[in-house]
């Protein structure tokens, strides 16, 4: 019977720091990068040995700049990697040199253990045990495979009994921890009765997956649990077939086949080099590749991120033309939402997506509102000022050409751009405003001479009656405004991209327009 852990999956809020830790520090190999199968707009990275072998894998769902989770019962709390016993001193020195939080070494269940924390605060243990790697990594001290996981449970007897279904047997206990072993690794079940429940988020392990010998075993497990265990249907994850279930104390468990493996769409020598999207999302593959966060592997050229007042993300095209489009989402969006549209408008622009800081009923916005058409004026002014500081910081911190920046906003984001132009004149000289309205009740007269604005309004937009006031205010300040009404409501249409692209070619500096003409 195939036994042991297939992979462990966690959540990270900083993809670059995550890659730097697991590839750069631990020395694992990035073996797959893909859009999530449950949410293709969420990057999913897998790390492991040279071949991405089951039993060596840890993966991360990327919630970029997402909220932190809480450690508690009903979760996998720690993940452990096996390393050569003689390497423990080397790992301790490396951790201290790299300023990675480390405790130990100490002995747990008779084994030497170093406890590290990854950049999200997740506990990663290095355990000095002999073991042969299925596909060894380079370096004499590299991890050989997963050593095990620790599950926090309020019902440890039932949790241990459930884990035994996957080929584990109990061999002993140490304090509140009981140990179960398979042919390859261990599961420690820790009694945390009375502790708080876990909360998903960055720095939390989402689930552990156990190895299934084949599809028949997965389907048999599904049938055996049809009356309980909160079990899902069988899922085809392209690289393995699996199902999910919750053990009696609430920890999410996956049961996954070894085959077909990560070489099904990439040769082993090139694992992890290509970004894939789930088969069901191939029709929007290009959009997803724009929206998923970019990162650099150790040794690759990278673009350091600055600490600015708004969460933001860059997308850099293969052949940038030197221009930048700054993108502001609508209500409920995020920093990546506008990237597909912006790419259609100018495929060679560097895209800088920004996330609004106000929240309403759990969704991102750019400023507070009292109802659908009444806005918090003090908050608009405060956020407009903060956004002006963000633009100044981005220009200086990232070396952007201020004369070749175009601002693109939709709905609530476009409303903020209109307010910034009136409250912070000089910050924005070129803007595309999609379904925008005048958000200011007592707008100042601003000097907008030299500013160029495209307003695209919807003929059936229920908010459209407030758009002419913004157009009048911008024109009164001296801005050149091209206002068009499209056969649309508040939603965006393909015509928005076409109109914006034509306008942008006229609004670009002459030398850039000439380059675009010859592309």
Image (cartoon, rainbow, N blue to C red):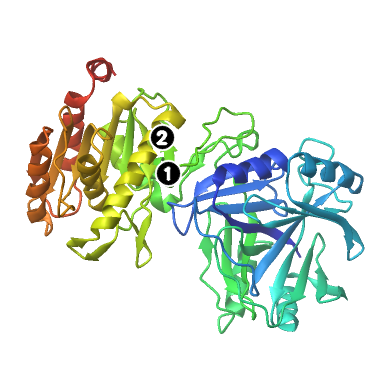
What whole-number distance in Å separates the C-alpha atoms at marks 2 and 1?
A: 10 Å
Observer-nearest of 385 and 91: 385
Image quadrant in which the C terminus is located? top left
Residue 198 vertical position relative to residue 418 in the rendered view, above or below = below
Q: Residues within 10 Å of mark 2 (few under 14, many from 20)?
A: some
In the displayed structure image, the side of residue 508 where residue 79 appears, left or right: right
Residue tagged 1? 312
Q: Secondary structure at mark 2?
A: helix
Q: Please give the label number shown on residue 394.
A: 2
In the displayed structure image, the side of residue 33 where residue 313 appears, left or right: left
Contact between labelled residues 1 and 2, with CB atoms less than 8 Å apart: yes
Residue 42 vertical position relative to residue 496 in the rendered view, above or below = below
> At 28% across and 16% down in the image, what residue appears?
515
- The part of the image, by quadrant, that contains residue 20 is top right
Residue 14 x, y percent position in the rendering: 55, 48
- Mark 2 or mark 1: whose residue is earlier in sequence: 1
User: Of tags 2 and 1, which is closer to the observer?
Assistant: 2
In the displayed structure image, the side of residue 44 where residue 100 appears, left or right: right
Residue 17 x, y percent position in the rendering: 60, 44
Q: Secondary structure at mark 1?
A: strand
- The part of the image, by quadrant, that contains residue 475 is top left
Residue 352 vertical position relative to residue 205 in the rendered view, above or below = above
Residue 8 visible? The answer is yes
Q: Residues within 10 Å of mark 1 (few under 14, many from 20)?
A: many
Residue 368 x, y percent position in the rendering: 29, 60
> At 65% across and 46% down in the image, what residue appears?
47
């Amino acid at each position: 019977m195939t036994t042991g852990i297939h992979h462990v999956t966690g959540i990270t809020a900083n993809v670059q720091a995550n890659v730097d830790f697991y590839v750069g520090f631990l020395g694992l190999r990035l073996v797959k990068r893909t859009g999530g199968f449950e949410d293709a707009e969420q990057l999913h990275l897998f790390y492991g040995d040279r071949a991405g072998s089951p039993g060596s894998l840890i993966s991360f769902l990327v919630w970029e700049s997402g909220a932190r989770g809480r450690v508690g019962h009903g979760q996998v709390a720690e993940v452990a990697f096996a390393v050569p016993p003689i390497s423990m001193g080397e790992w301790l020195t490396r951790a201290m040199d790299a300023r990675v939080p480390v405790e130990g070494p100490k002995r747990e269940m008779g084994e030497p253990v170093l406890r590290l924390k990854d950049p999200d605060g997740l506990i990663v243990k290095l355990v000095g045990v002999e073991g042969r790697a299925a596909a060894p990594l380079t370096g004499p001290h590299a991890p050989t495979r997963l050593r095990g996981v620790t599950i926090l449970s309020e019902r440890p007897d039932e949790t241990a009994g459930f884990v035994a279904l996957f080929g584990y047997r109990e061999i002993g206990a140490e304090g509140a921890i009981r140990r179960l072993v398979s042919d390859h690794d261990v599961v420690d079940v820790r009694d945390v009765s009375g502790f708080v429940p876990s909360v998903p988020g960055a720095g939390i392990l989402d689930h552990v997956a156990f190895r299934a010998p084949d599809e028949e075993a997965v389907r048999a497990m599904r049938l055996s649990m049809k009356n309980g265990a909160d079990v899902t249907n069988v899922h085809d994850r392209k690289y393995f077939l699996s199902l999910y279930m919750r053990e009696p104390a609430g920890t999410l468990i996956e049961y996954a086949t070894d085959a077909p493996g990560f070489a099904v769409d990439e040769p082993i020598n090139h694992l992890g080099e290509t970004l894939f999207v789930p088969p069901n999302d191939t029709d929007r593959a290009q959009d997803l590749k724009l929206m998923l966060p970019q990162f650099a592997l150790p040794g690759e050229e990278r673009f350091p991120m600055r600490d600015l007042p708004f969460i933001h993300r860059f997308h850099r095209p293969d052949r940038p033309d030197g221009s930048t489009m700054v993108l502001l989402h609508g209500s409920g969006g995020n920093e990546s939402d506008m990237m597909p549209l912006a790419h259609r408008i100018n495929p060679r622009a560097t895209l800088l997506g920004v996330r609004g800081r106000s929240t309403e009923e759990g969704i991102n916005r750019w400023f507070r509102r009292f109802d659908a058409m009444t806005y918090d004026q003090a908050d608009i002014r405060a956020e407009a000022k903060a956004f002006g500081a963000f633009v100044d910081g981005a220009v200086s911190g990232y070396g952007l050409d201020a004369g070749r920046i175009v601002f693109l906003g939709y709905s609530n984001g476009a409303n903020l751009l209109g307010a910034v132009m009136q409250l912070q004149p000089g910050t924005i000289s070129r803007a595309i405003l999609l379904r925008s309205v005048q958000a200011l009740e007592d707008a100042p007269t601003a000097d907008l001479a030299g500013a160029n604005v495209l307003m695209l309004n919807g003929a059936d937009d229920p908010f459209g009656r407030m758009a002419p006031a913004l157009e009048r205010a911008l024109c009164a300040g001296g801005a050149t405004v091209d206002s068009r009404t499209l056969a649309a409501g508040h939603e965006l249409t393909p015509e928005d991209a076409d109109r914006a692209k034509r306008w942008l070619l006229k609004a670009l500096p002459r030398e850039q327009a000439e380059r675009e003409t010859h592309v």
